[in-house]
Amino acid sequence: MILVFISLLSASAFNRRYKQVKAGEAKTTEVTPYKKPSGNATRFLGIWLSSGYILQPEQTTYIEAGKFKSIYSEAGRSMAVQWATAFHNKKYQWYQSTDGKTWGEVPKNDNGKNKNLKVEPKEAGTTYYQLDTYWKSPTGWTTASHLYSNVATVHAVPEPVDAQEVKVTTDDDYLYNSPNEIVSNETYAHAIPTPANFTGDVSWSIDNTNLATIDKESGLITANTKGLSGKVMVTATMHNPVGADITGEKEVTIGGGLDDQTVKAGKTAAFDLRGNIGDLDEEGEDTNYSVEWYKEDPITHVRGKITTTDPHDLSYTTPKTTLDDDGTLYSATIKVKYSGKNYSYTTNDALLHVTPVGGPDIEMTNSLTNNTFNDGSNSSTMLFGVNNNDVITYNDTVTNKSTSGTLSDAKYVLPLRVGTRVTSVKVDGEDVNSDNYEMKHNYATGSNDLIISGLNFKINDSHQIEVETMVSGITARESFRLIPYIYGTSDSDDSTYQKVGDDEIINYTTDTAVIKQVQDIDYGTINGISSAKTLTRQAELNLPNNVVEVEDMRRNKKPVKIVVVQDGALQTANGDVFAGQLRYYDNGHYKNLDEGPVAVTETQADEELISLGWDEDNGILLFLESKWNVAGTYSTTLNWSIEDSI
């Protein structure tokens, strides 16, 4: 039995006053929405707690009659609702009204069923719009939920109006550089023009696309998920219909959750979890969160949990620091239980710099460079796509900034991945005699430490260190983290002084394309005899999920193809052969897999080979002939390979 409960609410109960403002006049219009607006979605970290709109349509838009503009929006469901209706499809329907009371659907050929609405008024006047975002089951029989936007008012005016200035805002000014689903790596930018009745268009740009990208039309900012940190400048360009274009800017920070801190010895340091955190109402055992704080010794990499008084603390303040604390790494792990499911996210390691009060004051400016390859994503402390035989150079400028203290008989330590070959060591441009450096395996960290001895730092003294290496021994994708450091004797009190540099990360790859995983396909249970038809895969193997997971680590992306071969008949263990064929479908066309190898995708030169996923009408499907099938379990094996494409 299926019960459908329908609740009809009077729209008149949701009247809202909207101001209709035209150039040179102000007028108040009583607008009754088509349906009560659902409001904005709410979240804690990156978890959507309630369904609603992430981006509401612009409340008021001005446009010159005869021109066109687009109205942008985005709605989302709470994570709990997403679980319950994971395979429902997102649909859209816009409604319009010219009097604020009588509403009708925007026709499909006028973009009425698109997420973003393109409007093109023919004459001056005011039109009101409201979006219904809803989700339908794959069969189309049931609708999961409806979310109604705020009302958008569009004024069509007879004359163009230029913007004199623009203010840029963002919903969040900090985004996480991680794909983890419980942190936020997206936000929207907004342009607020003066005067408000600006009739031109807005386009968006960003100054560093390695850190983040932006949709040039909607203003959606998406942070990188490769761990790259920094600041980006978001620019709105107001395209004036008469005069010159004008721009406005807003800075957004991209990071892993914590910022490095620098304090004088004897002072405390505070580490705060960054970003728009939000609030989580803890509802018993099924919904709660906790934060665990950790610190790590920069030399031994021993990590320990910090005892705090409140498990909900989103910040941690250290005790009074000493020089021994310099280089300590701090991180936080946020554990969230939401509707009975557990999630966690661990921040980046934030570095604590402790500067001395008297004695030597060493500053390290370290960097690394791949002299063989750079695809534009490398930074001074992080390398990507490093392969065997690449030449990596480590540079460090070590300076004593003290005006009173000196450092004697210092040793500089550079941790290297096991297998790295050192080809050159220089200090101040001169080759270092092998008697003054050594390679020593560090059993605590698993690295091979290059140690340069005999360094002395007088007041304001500086040394340039350069180490050239060659990569070897890489057999799989992996990452290696290192922190160079220096230690020696402080001449002011004969104590041991230590200073660490910045965290550096090398991401190694193998310069190959590989198939990492292939999902088993199950076509369910069928009757022994049935009319001819095509059977689809289980729903969880349709887009957005993949059937074949591919990792393309190649630098030189030559044309390749993925080929699938059926290894034997589709049959039972007793040898009964299935009356039908496995087929590869591509937009209405198909090839039978039992007739030989089938290429299911093919790349062009310089094109990345991506993982394979299909909608329910494409990909590997099973054609059932109108014949008798003996009861039993039918199976076969599909072999997948990557081959050069001619």
Image: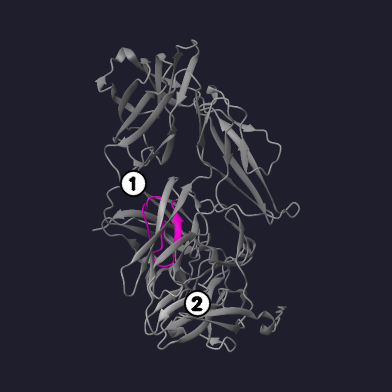
Q: Is residue 597 visible?
A: no
Looking at the image, residue 272 lies above or below residue 189: above
Please tell me whether residue 54 belongs to the stretch shown in magenta: no
**Would residue 496 be seen by someone viewing this image from the given angle?**
yes
Q: Position of residue 383 (x, y in %)?
A: 36, 40
Gap between marks 2 and 1, in whole Å? 45 Å
Against 400, residue 54 (above or below) is below
State the SS at label 2: loop
On residue 86, the disc is none
What x and y, as percent, mark residue 432? 28, 17
* Residue lying farthest to the right in this orientation: 284
Highlighted range, magenta:
205-224
Indicate the quadrant containing the C terminus: top left, top right, bottom left or bottom right.
bottom left
Location of residue 246 (image quadrant)? bottom left
From the viewer's perspective, is 110 left or right of 513?
right
Instruction: Determine the secondary structure under disc 1.
Output: loop
Residue at (51%, 72%) from the top-left corner?
57
Closer-to-camera residue (158/511): 158
* Tag 1: amino acid: Thr
Describe the colour scheme in one phrase. one colour
Local crowd at mark 2 within 10 Å, few (<14), some, or many (≥20)?
some
Q: Which residue is drawn at the image coordinates 27% and 56% (left, top)?
A: 559
Q: Position of residue 488 (x, y in %)?
A: 44, 15
The three-letter code of the residue at mark 2 reads Lys
604 left or right of 487 in image: left
Task: Check disc 2 and report the residue beneath it.
Answer: 627
Mark 2 or mark 1, which is nearer to you? 1
When the figure is inspected, residue 595 is found, relative to residue 334, above or below; the finding is below
Query: Which residue has dot 1 on it?
Result: 512
